[in-house]
């Protein structure tokens, strides 16, 4: 390989990052610089070094036309080499997820993570400024998902503020190495030239090389005769290319000029069709262009060797000829069935304001791109809108398209602002603003449920639109659900009625209403089907159908709309928790939080934190639970109970309606009245029977059997613990001990070590001997976690200002007992005064900022 000149410092940074990757520290390196500055050469040197060190290397380069094909920029890197990152079957599986960007990104990150297990890797993307939106999104997810992988992610990009590389650098949590490239020194340029010539540079060439201003690409082109040094770099390159192409045949020159209008990448058959020449006749001219150093054959496509060469060749095509060629190219691509998306860049190159034909093509292109490239579709439809005149009614029609496509691209704020501007009579649109236009725009926005109620009323709108708006008012809680004739309005009213029934705990009724609502075909104003099904599955789980609801929730985690990922993740976490699958519940909650960050919407974060806090409490990780609790009163009550405050149990009766596994908390609180008001189900009936039974062993046995049919292991453990304790207290060891042993085994298997430890202590106190007790983690030796429940209670009371005597009265123990506990607290927490203890407790239990 030709030596890399003048970049020892930059290459050193990349090699250091490679060494770190080899030691398990993933990172991102971004090489940036102007065209021709040597970014690709630096990447090639890094690739060579990585291969020498035994790294798996996956490399690709983005191209200007990538933004019309999903994952076009990254796909070559995934499939390159004898040992690709993903195999053929996996790649085909990914292709089926093109319309679900988040699921695709998650699956791809998972596949790459598995492939990189025990492997050191370098993943390279050149010309990242041209990355297609899906590639940019996938990289953000994958880099963040694999912080412990032995991988260096290496990107090269032109300076592009806010572009893909900047977005990636700002989004990821791994270390980011920014490596800007400056022009080479004069000595480095001369060394580079000597390498290319295989001999020393003569004085006359050295003088010309001084005119390339440190840009290695221009130095190479000067040597190749494709650049004439001078004060104007562009003029020097244009003149050099002009001189080189003058030696080509006339057909060869036509081929270069026509290809330059197509773009940096093109198909020979397309150029041949435009030149009205058989492909065979272009074989010799193509070889001329390749030999001249202008083009390279990549197999299925041809490319200019560098974008600067294409720009230089394009400068020899008069603007009028460029316009004509762009128009001809657009027509040809459309007639050849290549699609409006492929033709769109050429349409835009020649379109003028008021060109309705161009607007039609761009609208078609946006529709074609919408399912797989929604971000690109949003850009294309905005360009179509800009081509319409401000007083043309067509502008309003295209404006509606803009709003709908922005919403599909999950850009609600931008869509709302655009709709408001369109309807406000500003310079954006001067045409007629009809009631139907207003209603249509509002109905596009309404399913996101962030409009003010007054925006859901449009006097004079068509009946079916008015009915749909009325249904959305019912969903917002402004009106009661009512009858409707329009199918979409009926569906929305059913969802409104379902949500009302769900909030009242009538889960079976709500489930049936959700099912009915999902029968309508989606149309303007309808809610996303996946979100409606989320409500249905929650109600199914509360109506003795937990296992089926959980199975369907798992399916939707890859088959449902990825834009609904946070809602699906929270549902999935709750159902896994209800089923006693703590690890899966924790994973789903963490995934939901990660997806909320990806979609920039953390409105459901408290719901995910609830599940994580409950899992932490069951595992005895009180510090972790406390960090997650925030201002949640139910979690705070559970923490107080864990800290020894028995009075906090009563606060659980006020558990919110939609709290995860609310029935178990009501059972813990002996909330008889609240349990009576619950919708009948095996879980609620069983919990009610447990509380109503009190200490009656026979009645508790019957209640336990009811709970058993609910298939909720944690709830069953609660019920059976009461049964076992009551039996022991009545002197019936033959019944009580086996019952508690079943509870202990169940909780241990579930990973609920905190309640398992409590049951184990009860059994040991009862004199039960086992050859091997459950592996309950030992209590910490220092810190808050090391305190017993009584010690925690004493610490909290002292921090509140209690004396030993008043604390003793509160706890119904002696003052000397309080003193004993307080000395233990001082030793375990490393404090030696009540003031220090108070400060520590206040710091620990201070509410989070903005709580």
Image (cartoon, helix red, strand yellow):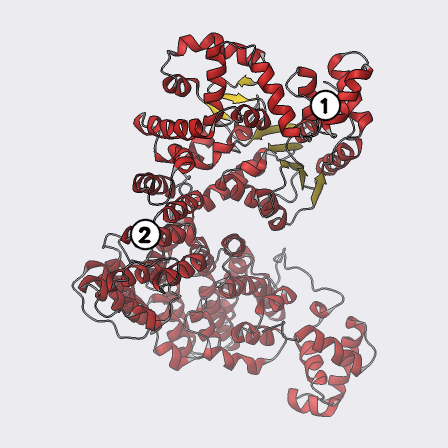
Q: Position of residue 627 (x, y in %)?
A: 62, 67
Compare residues 432 and 586 and report the one nearer the observer: 432
Whether residue 839 is situated above or below residue 534 in the rendered picture: below
- Residue in view at x 74 percent, y 33 percent: 183
Q: Position of residue 270 (x, y in %)?
A: 40, 21
Could you tell me which quadrant the N terminus lies in? top right
Pick whichever of labels 2 and 1 is earlier in the sequence.
1
Whether residue 25 is situated above or below residue 255 in the rendered picture: below
Could you tell me which quadrant the C terminus lies in? bottom right
Q: Nearer the viewer, mark 2 or mark 1?
A: 2
- Picture quadrant of residue 464: bottom left
Label 1 Cα crowd, 10 Å radius (few <14 / some 14-19 / many 20+): few
Residue designated by label 1: 52
- 472 on left or right of 616: left
Q: Is residue 144 visible?
A: no
Q: Position of residue 689 (x, y in %)?
A: 37, 74
- Residue in view at x 60 percent, y 73 percent: 850
Whether residue 81 is situated above or below residue 713 in the rendered picture: above
Q: Position of residue 682 (x, y in %)?
A: 34, 66
Compare residues 680 and 584 and report the one nearer the observer: 584
Label 2 Cα crowd, 10 Å radius (few <14 / some 14-19 / many 20+): many
Residue at mark 2 to residue at mark 1: CA–CA distance:
59 Å
User: Which type of secondary structure does the marked residue at label 2 adopt?
Assistant: helix
- 181 on left or right of 530: right
Compare residues 552 and 313 and report the one nearer the observer: 313
Whether residue 217 is situated above or below residue 802 in the rendered picture: above
Residue designated by label 2: 395
- Picture quadrant of residue 534: bottom left
- 516 on left or right of 705: left
Q: Which mark is residue 104?
A: none
């Amino acid at each position: 390989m030709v030596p890399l000149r003048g970049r020892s410092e930059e290459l050193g940074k990349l090699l250091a990052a490679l060494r770190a990757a080899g030691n398990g520290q993933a990172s991102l390196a971004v090489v940036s610089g102007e065209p021709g500055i040597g970014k690709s050469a630096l990447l090639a040197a890094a690739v060579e070094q990585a291969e020498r060190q035994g790294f798996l290397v996956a490399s690709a380069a983005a191209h200007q036309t990538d933004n019309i094909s999903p994952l076009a920029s990254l796909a070559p890197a995934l499939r390159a080499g004898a040992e690709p990152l993903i195999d053929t079957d996996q790649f085909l599986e990914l292709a089926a997820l093109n319309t679900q960007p988040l699921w695709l990104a998650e699956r791809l990150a998972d596949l790459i993570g598995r492939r990189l297990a025990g492997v050191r890797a370098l993943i390279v993307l050149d010309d990242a400024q041209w990355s297609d939106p899906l590639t940019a999104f996938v990289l953000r997810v994958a880099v963040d998902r694999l912080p412990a992988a032995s991988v260096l992610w290496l990107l090269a990009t032109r300076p592009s503020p806010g572009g893909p590389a900047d977005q990636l650098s700002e989004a990821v949590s791994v270390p980011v190495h920014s490596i800007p490239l400056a022009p080479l020194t004069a000595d480095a340029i001369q060394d580079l030239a000597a390498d290319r010539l295989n001999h020393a540079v003569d004085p006359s060439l050295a003088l010309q090389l001084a005119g390339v201003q440190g840009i290695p690409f221009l130095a190479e082109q000067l040597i190749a005769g494709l650049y004439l040094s001078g004060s104007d770099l562009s003029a020097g390159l244009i003149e050099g290319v002009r001189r080189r192409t003058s030696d080509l045949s006339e057909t060869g020159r036509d081929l270069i000029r026509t290809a330059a209008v197509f773009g940096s990448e093109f198909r020979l058959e397309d150029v041949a069709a435009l030149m009205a020449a058989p492909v065979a006749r272009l074989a010799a001219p193509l070889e001329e262009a390749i030999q001249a150093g202008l083009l390279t054959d990549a197999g299925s496509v041809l490319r200019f060797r560098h974008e600067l060469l294409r720009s230089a060749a394009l400068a020899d095509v008069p603007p009028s000829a460029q316009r004509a060629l762009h128009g001809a190219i657009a027509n040809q691509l459309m007639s050849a069935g290549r699609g409006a998306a492929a033709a769109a860049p050429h349409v835009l190159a020649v379109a003028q304001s008021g060109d309705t034909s161009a607007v039609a093509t761009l609208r078609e292109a946006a529709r074609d791109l919408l399912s797989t490239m929604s971000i690109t579709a949003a850009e294309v439809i905005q360009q179509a809108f800009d081509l319409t005149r401000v007083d043309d009614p067509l502008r309003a029609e295209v404006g509606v398209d803009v709003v709908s496509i922005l919403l599909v691209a999950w850009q609600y704020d931008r869509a709302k602002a655009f709709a408001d501007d369109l309807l406000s009579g500003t310079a954006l649109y001067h045409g007629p603003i009809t009631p139907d236009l207003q209603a249509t725009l509002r109905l596009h926005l309404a399913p996101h449920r962030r409009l003010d109620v007054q925006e859901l009323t449009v006097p004079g709108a068509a009946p079916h639109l008015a009915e749909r708006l009325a249904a959305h008012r019912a969903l917002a809680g402004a009106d009661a659900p009512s009858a409707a004739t329009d199918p979409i309005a009926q569906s929305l009213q059913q969802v409104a009625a379902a949500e009302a029934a769900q909030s009242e705990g009538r889960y079976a009724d709500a489930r049936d209403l959700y099912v009915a609502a999902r029968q309508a075909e989606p149309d303007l104003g309808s809610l996303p089907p996946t979100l409606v099904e989320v409500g249905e599955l929650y109600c199914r789980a509360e109506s003795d159908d937990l296992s089926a609801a959980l199975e369907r929730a798992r399916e939707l985690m890859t088959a449902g709309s990825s834009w609904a990922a946070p809602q699906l993740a929270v549902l999935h976490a709750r159902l896994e928790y209800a089923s006693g699958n703590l690890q899966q519940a924790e994973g789903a909650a963490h995934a939901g939080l990660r997806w909320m960050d990806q979609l920039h919407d953390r409105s459901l974060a408290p719901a995910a934190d609830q599940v994580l806090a409950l899992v932490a409490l069951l595992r005895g990780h009180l510090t972790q639970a406390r960090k997650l609790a925030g201002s949640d009163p139910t979690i705070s009550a559970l923490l107080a109970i864990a800290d020894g405050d028995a009075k906090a149990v009563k606060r659980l009766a006020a558990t919110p309606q939609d709290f995860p596994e609310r029935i178990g908390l009501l059972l813990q609180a002996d909330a008889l009245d609240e349990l009576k008001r619950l919708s009948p189900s095996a879980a609620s009936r069983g919990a009610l029977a447990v509380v109503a039974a009190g200490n009656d062993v026979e009645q508790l046995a019957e209640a336990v059997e009811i709970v058993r049919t609910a298939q909720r292991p944690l709830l069953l453990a609660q019920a059976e613990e009461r049964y076992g304790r009551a039996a022991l207290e009545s002197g019936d060891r033959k019944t009580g001990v086996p019952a508690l042993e079943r509870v202990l085994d169940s909780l241990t298997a579930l990973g609920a070590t905190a309640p398992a430890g409590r049951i184990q202590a009860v059994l040991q106190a009862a004199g039960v001997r086992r050859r091997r007790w459950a592996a309950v983690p030992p209590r910490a030796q220092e810190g808050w976690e090391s305190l017993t429940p009584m010690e925690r209670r004493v610490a909290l009371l002292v921090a509140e200002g209690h004396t030993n005597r008043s604390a003793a009265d509160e706890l119904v123990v002696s003052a000397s007992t309080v003193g004993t506990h307080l000395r233990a607290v001082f030793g375990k927490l490393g404090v030696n005064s009540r003031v220090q203890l108070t400060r520590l407790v206040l710091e620990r239990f201070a509410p989070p900022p903005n709580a």
